Amino acid sequence: MNYLSRFFVISLLLFLAACSTLYYGGLEKIGIPKRDVLVHRVEKARDTQEETKEQFKSALEQFTAVTNFKGGDLEAVYNKLNSEYEASAAKADEVSDRISAIEDVSEALFTEWEQEIAQYSNASLKRSSQHKLIATRAHYQQLITTMKNAETKIKPVLTVFKDQVMFLKHNLNAQAIASLKGELGTLQSDVSSLISSMERSINEANAFISTMEKK
């Protein structure tokens, strides 16, 4: 990366950081603290993961149905399969966006929290706040790790979906159906693993939300 490229990237990061600071500052002025923004974004991510789980179930059902194709309009079959793939890909992007949004506000929250701890004059209150920060950060790290683990399960499934959809597009015949049958076992296993990871992530999100609401 040359000097100009590095300068552009650094400038962009600084600009985005400034935008986030102004955004969160604006919310706090109307009574919405970063803590509430974090909880809200975790809720949205949880809901998106639930939707993603159902979408991948639907896509797998469609792939399974295609392997049982006995005759008819193969182009119509391809169109349905392609729609399922595109919907799954869109949900995958949404999951990534939700995780990025959580990371953005959490960084701002924890940075602010650390700065405020340094301002305490009362040692007892300072220790109490420090302990709460450590506990919250540990729980958050567990949450984001679980979410990212679930996210990593998405790409392998999408890759197989995409390959098979493209192959079917250019080979609307029995050979393409046979190819799908050959991949069905792998798809079922991968989707099952994805769904389990999503459910763990959803449960972790619920636990995190519950903890944050009690504090």
Image (spheres, helix red, strand yellow):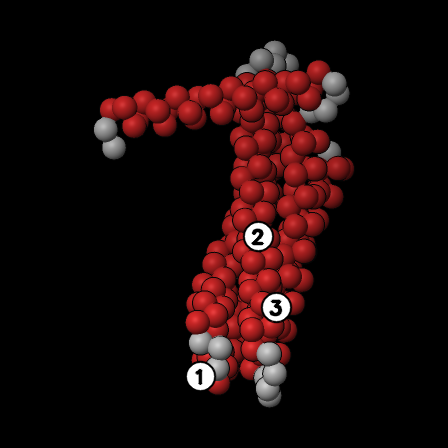
x, y percent for residue 64: 59, 78
Sooner in the amino-acid sequence: mark 2 or mark 3: 3
CB atoms at circles 2 and 1 under 8 Å apart? Answer: no
Q: Nearer the viewer, residue 144 or 63?
A: 63
The three-letter code of the residue at mark 3 reads Lys
- The label shown at residue 42 is none
Of the numbered discs 1 and 3, the one sitting upstream in the chain is 3
Residue sticking out furthest to the bottom: 70
Which residue is labeled 1 in the image? 175
Residue type at tag 1 = Gln
Residue 115 against residue 153 in the figure, above or below: above
Task: Name the residue type under label 2.
Answer: Ala
Q: Position of residue 203 (x, y in %)?
A: 67, 54
User: Within 10 angstroms of label 1, few (less than 14), some, or many (20 or more) residues?
Assistant: few
Residue 22 position, x and y percent, is 59, 18
At 58% from the left and 67% from the top, the residue drawn is 79
Q: SS class of the residue under badge 2?
A: helix
The image quadrant where one finds the C terminus is top right
Classify residue 140 by image quadrant: top right
Mark number displayed over residue 90: 2
Question: Which sits earlier in the primary sequence, circle 2 or circle 1?
Answer: 2
Closer to the eye: label 2 or 1: 1
